[in-house]
Amino acid sequence: MRKGVCTFAAVGLVASLGLAACSQPQESGDDTPKVGVILPDQASAVRWETADRRYLEEAFKAAGIEYEIVNAQGSTENFLTLTDQLITGGVDILMIVNLDSGSGAAALQKARNAGVKTIDYDRLTLNGGADYYVSFDNVEVGRLQGQGLIKCLEDQGVENPRIVYLNGSPTDNNATLFREGYHEVLSKKYDEGWVFVDERSVPDWDGTQAVTLFEQMFTAHGGGIDGVLSANDTLGNSAITVLKREGLNGKIPVTGQDASVAGLQNILAGDQCMTVYKAIKKEADAAAALAIALAKGETPSGLTTVKDTESGRDVPAKLEKPVAIFKDNVKDVVDDGFVTVDELCTPDFAALCEEAGIS
């Protein structure tokens, strides 16, 4: 354990990508515990830099724990380089959000070899062997999306609707869990006359690729789509982009997840029917509390377990609960401090915010 200094996460190429991060200075000397965090990117979701980093920093500062938070910017090579640098820099705990299970497992193995405790944050690294896992109940996230799409279609009175899916990245275990949840819910409706039409998985949650994939589905089925199960707000916005071109935005319900500013604005505008709010502050606070307890040599309590489907291991876990957000409760996300009125209620959306009781 080392003194707190403003350290830079990388040099050369990594530094050029803006991955520098400052550790929190401490006055207690060499015995101050240190936590290292690797975030995955900024492209798949804005939350990593706008929310997770901020909440983790606040928690570590409040506890007087030295920390260093870096971002791999979507590169598995950078991810492993940053792992080496954090370990060399003396972290006692390594918390990661993997880009995929292969590179994530390699990073966790490096930490184990160095005697560093490990936490999978938000995404479970399959066959990775992390000591702990902190996330949301991601199958429940998918269930809420499926239930949300059902509500939106039934509210519109659509009979025997035809459904397509824009799934998340095939390398993200969370995407697999979301899909499990919404397929569980919607499969029951197919026995009642609903129609499964098509589905595509979007590499790296990339919005541009999602536009292309949704266009392909839309064209292949002659526009015969009544509902779109999109696994997050970025993918939902991609579907909405195509639907706008066809003059069908607001007529075909689209789901989402993350309660992003863009997703909430789409809901206020009537172009997206719902999103799933994951109170990231609760997730970050839980992860930080776990890391702090481990750094202090304490035994964590109040945990459940999650099955690693590849290794068969039961991973000690802390899971937070997600919440479905529709137009009538967008205000709850603002009241919770996850987004601000200024961010959400830009001039184009000011009147819609007022109608929703947001001011």
Image (cartoon, rainbow, N blue to C red):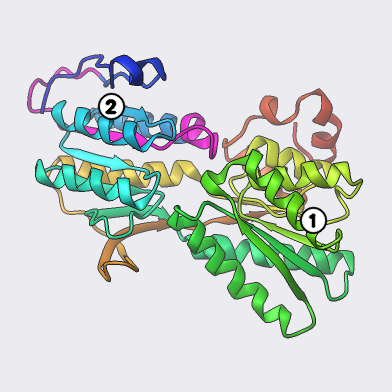
Residue drawn 32% across the image and 34% down it? 77
CA gap, disc 2 to disc 1? 45 Å
Q: Is residue 174 magenta?
A: no
Q: Quadrant of the N terminus?
A: top left
Q: Residue furthest right?
A: 247
Residue drawn 53% across the image and 68% down it? 180
Residue drawn 80% across the image and 82% down it? 193
In this rendered view, identify the residue nearer to me: 44 or 214. Answer: 214
Q: Which element carries disc 1, helix, strand or loop? A: helix
Left-right relation of 191 to 35? right
Q: Position of residue 275 (x, y in %)?
A: 66, 51
Q: Which mark is residue 268?
A: none
Q: Position of residue 174 (x, y in %)?
A: 47, 56
- Which residues make up the magenta segment? 25-51
Residue type at numbered disc 2: Glu
Q: Which element carries disc 2, helix, strand or loop? A: strand
Q: Position of residue 179 (x, y in %)?
A: 56, 64
Q: Is residue 44 magenta?
A: yes
Left-right relation of 22 to 53? left
Q: Quadrant of the C terminus?
A: top right
Q: Is residue 355 above or below residue 198?
A: above
Residue 325 in sight in this render: yes
Residue type at numbered disc 1: Phe
Q: Which mark is residue 68?
A: 2
The residue that disc 1 covers is 218
Q: Residues within 10 Å of mark 1 (few under 14, many from 20)?
A: some
